[in-house]
Image: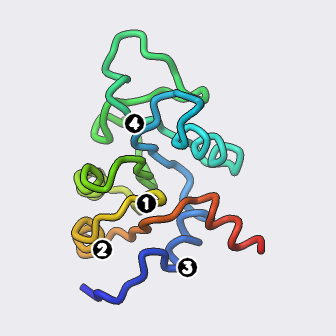
Amino acid sequence: MDISRSWQDRAVVDTMLDDLQTWAIVGLSGDPSRTAYQIAAALQRAGKRIVPIHPVFDEPGAPTVLGQQGYRSLSEVPFPVDVVDVFRRSEAAGPFADEAVAIGAKGVWFQLGVVDEDAFARTWEAGVPMVMDTCPLIEWRKRAA
């Protein structure tokens, strides 16, 4: 593992933002006041397909979020996921990176403030690019500046 690898490698960020279309949003429950909801809506406006991932979707009659069916876990999503975008505390985020690798995701994105260096190393070692401690909106703004 190249320990000097950047958490926000420009080429990886650009590939995820430009080329990868289906984003599973871990922590997206449907509460419009939450950051996960706002980022998911922005991803949709940018043409991405979002997939809500949250335990609330285990409940009968759980509503859709931003018009999309949600799932309790990544392993329940019945179609390929390109990016797993994680809105969880750092200490709880690592298992989602591992699950992203297990389902064949093409990338993992840990949101601003979410850092797990061991998960970062494991994910890259498994051949899955990862971005950590940033937000798609921040990265889009950097490119526009």
The residue depicted at 77 percent of the width and 71 percent of the height is 144
Q: Is residue 97 above or below residue 24?
A: below
Q: Circle 4: is it few (<14), some (14-19), or many (20+) Cα within 10 Å?
A: many
Q: Nearer the viewer, mark 1 or mark 3?
A: 1
Q: Quadrant location of the C terminus? A: bottom right
Residue 124 shows in the view? yes
- Amino acid type, callout 4: Ile
Q: Which residue is mark 3?
A: 10
Q: Which residue is mark 2?
A: 124
Q: Which residue is mark 1?
A: 113
Picture coordinates of residue 92 (x, y %)? 26, 49
Q: CA distance from mark 3 to mark 2?
A: 15 Å
- Amino acid type, callout 3: Arg
Q: Nearer the viewer, residue 29 or 11?
A: 29
Q: Is residue 95 above or below residue 125?
A: above
- Amino acid type, callout 2: Trp
Residue 106 shows in the view? no
Picture coordinates of residue 95 (x, y %)? 22, 52
